[in-house]
């Protein structure tokens, strides 16, 4: 556990010293702010449901940018050789890297919390729906981050890592569209895999164990693949 | 005591190491000498447990390192050919990170950082960003991370590669200072480096150890290490 924290702390320290991290964070928040005011102005409703839907869409594009560097950069610069010759397990390396991006992502999400405060000040929102929405978007983010870390383990190239995670995340995001053209078991499988099918209920204020399990099991699955890939180093 | 038994390493259809066997006593300073691509780095990577051998085994104090990788990693300090540095970190933060990963007890981390900074002459730059340091300083930071856990085995892959002559002298002096009471395995294709630092030489050619001898014996037999190396690898100059 100490080593997971040490790696996560190092990732956070590097992020704090990197202008790119600040620029990405600022750009994301600026875009969120613009859409928040547009949505509130259009809808005139004391809810963040549409905001969560929009954030979910934008995270599809933002998260691969956060994760592409995590392990691919270590593979590229040779620092992975350093990590793997210290008495640190592959599990700790992957978990530490993952925790590092989770901290960054959670900070980004926390910076949108004033939206709730604004709504609370001027109206009487359904608090549970907002908290369920935040929980859902956070869980979904954790899943996307795990996909990003997994693809980052696979390669030395940050661009390739980002592209592969875009492909996987976009496929999961738009899987719901494909369900229209399928029937029977393929339809059911695609419906189950679709992230939108699982995130909608959170944004409506519903917490269901199947949706929570979908995101948690998806996250654990990707982290397990990442850990196995670290051991078998397919980029060599 | 390090004992390698019939180590083979294949990359696809290419055999990088072919039945390599040797024994190294505690405290010996060994030089791996060979042309580029001879298999020196592969052998070192197997010894650090970074790579698994295709067949064969390496025993350290009787324990197979493939079965107990963490034991070996605790004993080893390793400097790869390209120093494994995080360019955005300060020297101090990097060494602290290395110390934590290498199981240095929490209450000794500060003391160890002070010591390696002193030994590697890094005191003046310890709060500087690594990316802004000269190549010589970066190499010293790489050596500092390798010794921060006070390893009993130190493995250095081309430690003076790409340095200017003054930096080469500085790094060699540093290695001479830190090699006391440690088993040091040094890989290079620079003959003078071996002459200055090693007491025993393994000449590696096409994945095999073709000569294992004391430096003194080689010098006695061939007059110079250069002549010994060229004769042993079978190099025939034209004209």
Image (spheres, coloured by chain):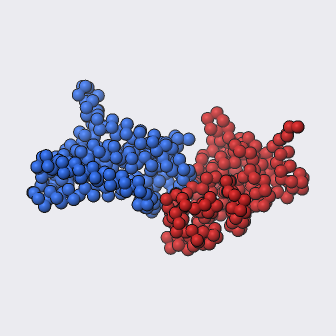
Left or right of residue A14: residue B1 = right
The residue closer to the viewer here, B74 or A33, is: A33
Image coordinates for residue A113, horizontal then vertical, percent? 23, 58
The residue closer to the viewer here, B74 or A16, is: A16
Left or right of residue A175: residue B214 = right
Give the residue drawn at x 22%, y 48%.
A35
Instruction: Please determine whether, in this image, residue B7 is positioned above or below residue B170.
Output: above
Query: Which chain gets the red colouring?
Result: B
Left or right of residue B103: residue A226 = left
Image coordinates for residue A205, horizontal then vertical, percent? 16, 49
Quarter assignment of residue B112: bottom right
Query: Which chain gets the blue colouring?
Result: A
The residue closer to the viewer here, A28 or B115, is: A28
Is residue B19 in view from this perspective?
no
Give the residue drawn at x 12%, y 52%.
A46
Left or right of residue B155: residue B235 = right
Instruction: Please determine whether, in this image, residue B183 is positioned above or below residue A149.
Output: below
The residue closer to the viewer here, A71 or A122, is: A122
Image coordinates for residue A171, horizontal then vertical, percent? 33, 35
Give the residue drawn at x 64%, y 52%.
B81
Image coordinates for residue A201, horizontal then vertical, percent? 19, 44
Identify the image quadrant of the N terminus of chain A. Answer: bottom left
């Amino acid at each position: 556990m100490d080593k997971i924290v040490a790696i996560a702390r190092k990732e956070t320290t590097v992020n704090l010293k990197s202008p790119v991290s600040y620029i990405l964070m600022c750009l994301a928040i600026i875009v969120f702010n613009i859409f928040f005011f547009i949505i509130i102005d259009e809808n005139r409703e004391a809810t963040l449901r549409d905001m969560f839907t929009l954030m979910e869409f934008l995270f599809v594009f933002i998260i691969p940018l956060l994760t592409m560097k995590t392990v691919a950069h270590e593979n590229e610069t040779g620092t992975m050789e350093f990590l793997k010759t210290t008495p640190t397990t592959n599990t700790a390396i992957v978990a530490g890297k993952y925790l590092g991006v989770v901290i960054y992502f959670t900070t980004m999400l926390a910076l949108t919390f004033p939206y709730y405060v604004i709504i609370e000040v001027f109206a009487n929102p359904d608090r549970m729906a907002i908290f369920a929405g935040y929980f859902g978007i956070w869980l979904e983010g954790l899943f996307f981050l795990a996909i990003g870390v997994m693809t980052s383990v696979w390669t030395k190239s940050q661009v390739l890592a980002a592209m592969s995670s875009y492909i996987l995340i976009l496929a999961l995001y738009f899987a719901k569209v494909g369900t229209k053209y399928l029937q029977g078991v393929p339809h059911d499988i695609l419906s189950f895999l679709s992230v939108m099918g699982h995130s909608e209920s959170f944004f409506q204020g519903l917490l269901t164990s199947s949706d929570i399990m979908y995101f948690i099991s998806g996250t654990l699955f990707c982290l397990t693949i990442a850990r196995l890939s670290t051991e078998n180093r397919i980029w060599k | 005591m390090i004992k390698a038994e019939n180590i083979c390493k294949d990359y696809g259809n290419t055999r990088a190491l072919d039945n390599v066997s040797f024994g190294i006593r505690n405290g010996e300073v060994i030089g791996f000498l060979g042309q580029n691509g001879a298999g020196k780095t592969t052998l070192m990577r197997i010894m650090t447990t970074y790579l698994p051998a295709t067949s064969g085994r390496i025993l350290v104090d009787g324990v197979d390192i493939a079965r107990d990788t963490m034991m070996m990693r605790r004993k080893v300090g390793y400097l790869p050919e390209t120093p494994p540095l995080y360019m955005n970190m300060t020297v101090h933060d990097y060494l602290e990170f290395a110390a934590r990963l290498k199981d240095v007890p929490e209450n000794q981390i500060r003391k160890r950082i002070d010591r390696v900074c002193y030994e590697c002459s890094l005191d003046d730059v310890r709060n500087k960003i690594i990316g802004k340091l000269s190549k010589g300083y970066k190499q010293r930071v790489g050596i500092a991370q390798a010794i921060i856990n006070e390893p009993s085995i130190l493995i250095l892959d081309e430690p003076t590669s790409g340095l200017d002559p003054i930096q080469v002298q500085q790094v060699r002096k540093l290695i001479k200072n830190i090699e006391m009471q440690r088993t040091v395995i040094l890989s290079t294709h620079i003959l003078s480096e071996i002459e200055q630092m090693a007491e025993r030489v393994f000449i590696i050619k096409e994945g095999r150890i073709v000569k294992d001898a004391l430096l003194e014996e080689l010098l006695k037999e061939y007059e110079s290490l250069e002549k010994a190396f060229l004769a042993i690898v079978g190099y025939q100059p034209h004209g």
